[in-house]
Image: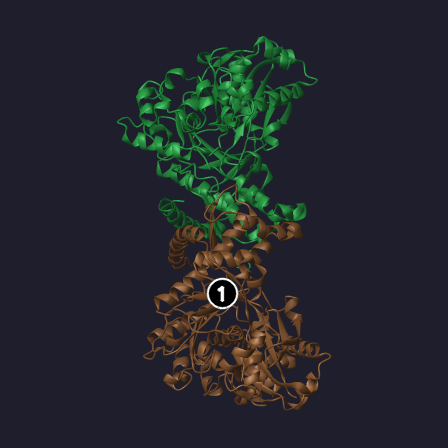
Chain colours: A green, B brown
Amino acid sequence: MKDIVIGLDFGTDSVRALLVRASDGGILGSAVRNYPRWSDGLYCDALSGRFRQHPLDYVEAMTSAVKAALCGVDASRVAAIGVDTTGSTVCAVDGRGVPLALLPEFAANPNAMFFLWKDHTAVPEAAEINAAARESAVNYLAYEGGIYSAEWFWSKILHMLRTDSAVRSAAYSFVEHCDWIPALLTGVTAAGGIMRSRCAAGAKTMWHPDWGGLPPDGFFTKIDPLLHGVTGRLFVRSHTSDAVAGRLSAEWADRLGLATDVAVGVGAFDCHMGAVGARIREGQMVKVFGTSTCDVMVASGLDRCVRGICGQVYGSVIPGLVGLEAGQSAFGDVYAWFRRLLSCSGEVLLSELEPASARISPGTTGIIALDWFNGRRTPDANGKLTGAIFGLNLGATAPMIYRALVESTAYGARKIIERFRDEMIAVNEVVAIGGISVKSDLVMQVCADVCNIPIKTVASDQVCALGAAIFASVNAGMYPSIPDAMEKMGAKYLKTYTPSAADAATYNREYSRYCRLAAMMEQEIDTYVR
Amino acid sequence: MKDIVIGLDFGTDSVRALLVRASDGGILGSAVRNYPRWSDGLYCDALSGRFRQHPLDYVEAMTSAVKAALCGVDASRVAAIGVDTTGSTVCAVDGRGVPLALLPEFAANPNAMFFLWKDHTAVPEAAEINAAARESAVNYLAYEGGIYSAEWFWSKILHMLRTDSAVRSAAYSFVEHCDWIPALLTGVTAAGGIMRSRCAAGAKTMWHPDWGGLPPDGFFTKIDPLLHGVTGRLFVRSHTSDAVAGRLSAEWADRLGLATDVAVGVGAFDCHMGAVGARIREGQMVKVFGTSTCDVMVASGLDRCVRGICGQVYGSVIPGLVGLEAGQSAFGDVYAWFRRLLSCSGEVLLSELEPASARISPGTTGIIALDWFNGRRTPDANGKLTGAIFGLNLGATAPMIYRALVESTAYGARKIIERFRDEMIAVNEVVAIGGISVKSDLVMQVCADVCNIPIKTVASDQVCALGAAIFASVNAGMYPSIPDAMEKMGAKYLKTYTPSAADAATYNREYSRYCRLAAMMEQEIDTYVR
């Protein structure tokens, strides 16, 4: 009777609801809804790196997407809902766990909204956290790559506390987006009752069993007394996503047209559930090719810290294995930036941009770029770094530059793979998911050639939502474990991009140049004070 | 009766004929004609740096321009014609002094045409010439800044000799554009009879009295035996442009509708005559702001070599003074490149680009560029250098980048001024001529602020042609000397751009960054072998 699970996947621009048959992963329906305020560019300022999302965007888009996906389906067949979101996407909540922007007095205040993963307003705060971590006897960043990012939880909340005294006064605690959605759906009425995601807690919040959960209050108050008491109002335990957060509240059962016995799982970040949707195994990197990338691996028996990646968390991907997360803070966003720069050009040229780029042979133009248009997430987070384009002459055309930008993002991908290998984590192939993996042969082939590694795409463009549905099937008790569910429900491979030996050799040479330029620019940025 | 002189100014894209009243510099008429084949993009390939011009382009455009300028004027009033051209713009000629592309068998062969100043095909040849010069006991580059450019005479002819055996076999000698036009107009029928310009010979051909004219044949054959005998078929003497090259031939008197007693002066490069048109004096830099720049100074009593500029030649500007030439190999071309990159964008946006750039405050975007889109001419020529744009993030807009490009060209201008000062040549003000000087308040003000120097523009957009006319008036015996003629006929000042103290301070900081990045990139290019 109950044979359907729902995967809810909150992306950067929209939410997707996926109805999945638990027995075999068959897709029974799906719907996508854009966030309305975000679509209008509200609360954001790209130049200063401010990207905020209103919680109502999530509420409205989710409600509409679930109802649309269920249209014509017998809703009583739904057993569970799994949730993934972007992250670290953080919001202040009151004592009841309500995001402050849902209160009338903060309805239009960007500081009371979710700080989207790519918000870069907290660069100074990240620097201070890193300084404090370097001075601390316990290395609280050991499992987060050793460098805390401006994109992460503590940087963002500290920035908010400093910036907005009204929001500060009203803030009782703080939530990740992936924690809030299950809490909302299950009718949690106190901030302390929110089930916290292992994935988010371990990768972004410095939570680790080695030091009994979060770092102590003293660590944070030394950075800024404004942080006094925050840890105490956050959480002690965190949960892997095979755990059930609760059942649908009466209100949400009603709003979504579902029964109150529907289980809601503990949330996690999109790429981690996406890796499960893509049936991740050791030796594979599952890479989400989107506006940014999220690069996920799993490892067993890992007894040391991997340097310079963003998260190393037991159970963040598959319970029982260590999940490893890296990523590039801008990927498709770099291409989108360039298209926007030319945007006045009308659709004709833009549609020609990629085919014309694809006709250019590797290593022939002398143009090379650095992909740090949104800072660098891994290896070795550094939010101050910026993008650059080198080797320009008067004959440089838009397709040449576009290709150089594509290549630069592939060099960034290679840097991450090389770091994993330097740290003795084998990377034998890449499984590509995310929009770009199915939209761009050029990007996939360039990545395969630059990284000299086979890249497999999967036969689903909804892998994150599928992963969330796989977790839901375990939440509903339909499978005993994630690997079991994954085996039956996970996405099949679609296509393999095999590296060309000749182009890989050319790109070896160009990659050396990228590394040389990258090192120079990294050195330069430290000497430049605006 | 004979009270009019004609200035003929051959630019990169077109030729201008200016009819000037010799008594006071009053303009009686003018006409501009584009080079037809060049306008169609023939014989050029921007990506490989090949820029060639067909001699018929010059012939046809000049004939049409002179006749158009004379329309309605009593042609018998014309006393003399002065000629300036771009340079080093070089062509192979046969024994009669005829450019090979005028022969039927070479009519469509780019190697038989003029190698335009900005042609960059001879980069390897320039490197070999520099290597040979370093090994030579006599420093033949002492008066050409110590580094021979790919844009100059010997690099280009060596490249041609190596590239095209048919043209090589037919080539008897080689001419600069500014030498060929007076030879053509005066009916010279042997290559040996062509009067050679002091300006071109001293600045580009290694001609200097210290070693009795051109370097010896042995110097060149050591670089490549293909150069054997070339010096002997070039020239021994060179002439300042107050000298008369001859009188109009019957054929050309007829073609232009002028009398055969019209004097034709020895030619020179455009910016040198432009400096005279702008009434250059010591302590001033006359800077031609065009697609590239040409920066001219004059000095008396200079008994040493100035490092890293492109030419230091006694009599190249004003007979009796040392003329000093520097320049930026891309200036307006950089802006044009960016507009072309966006070109699909339609005129609306392009017309907004500069006003929107002008509204951005200095030092606020973090974006900074290197202006070497066509290599670097001065200080210290290096054709391998390329342009770059740094500090890009996802919020970078077209106006921000445009402004950074404008600033980069101003930084390049400052580098040259600083070099002159380092070499103890005072630079107290800049006199701006050329199209951009009257078209762009933004560019002029940014240059004034970056260089922290007053910039004066002149009330004429035809200063080079006016300079050629000033020389013509001396050729015709109407004035005893160039300074006398210049005083009466030269252009008046129009406007002064005064540097803003605040912006100059901001730009000091940004300029330091430019210098740091420039040094890094200069080092990097030497390690990069495609």
User: Residue A99: image x %, image y %?
Assistant: 51, 19
Q: Residue at x 51, y 68 (%)?
A: B121
Q: Amino acid at mark 1?
A: Ser
The kind of secondary structure element at disc 1 is loop
Say above or below: A502 vs B160.
above
User: Residue B335: image x %, image y %?
Assistant: 55, 57
Q: Residue at x 36, y 18 (%)?
A: A229
Host chain of mark 1? B
The quarter of the image holding the C terminus of chain A is top left
Horizontally, residue A478 falls left or right of residue A229, namely right
Horizontally, residue A136 falls left or right of residue A25, namely left
Number of numbered tags placed on the structure image = 1
The quarter of the image holding the N terminus of chain A is top right
User: Residue B332: image x %, image y %?
Assistant: 55, 61
- The residue most toward the left is A137
Say above or below: A348 vs B25.
above
Classify mark 1: residues with Cα within 10 Å, few (<14), some (14-19) or many (20+): many
Residue situated in front as seen by the camera: B523 or B284: B284
Say above or below: B30 vs A380.
below
Residue situated in front as seen by the camera: A56 or A16: A56
Q: Residue at x 63, y 26 (%)?
A: A33
Q: Quadrant of residue A301?
A: top left
User: Residue B19: image x %, image y %?
Assistant: 64, 78
> Which residue was labeled with disc 1?
B329
Residue situated in front as seen by the camera: B111 or A182: A182
Q: Quadrant of residue B298?
A: bottom left
Q: Is residue B371 visible?
A: no
Horizontally, residue A516 falls left or right of residue B95, namely left
Q: Quadrant of residue B297?
A: bottom left
Say above or below: B45 vs A273.
below
Residue situated in front as seen by the camera: A417 or A180: A180
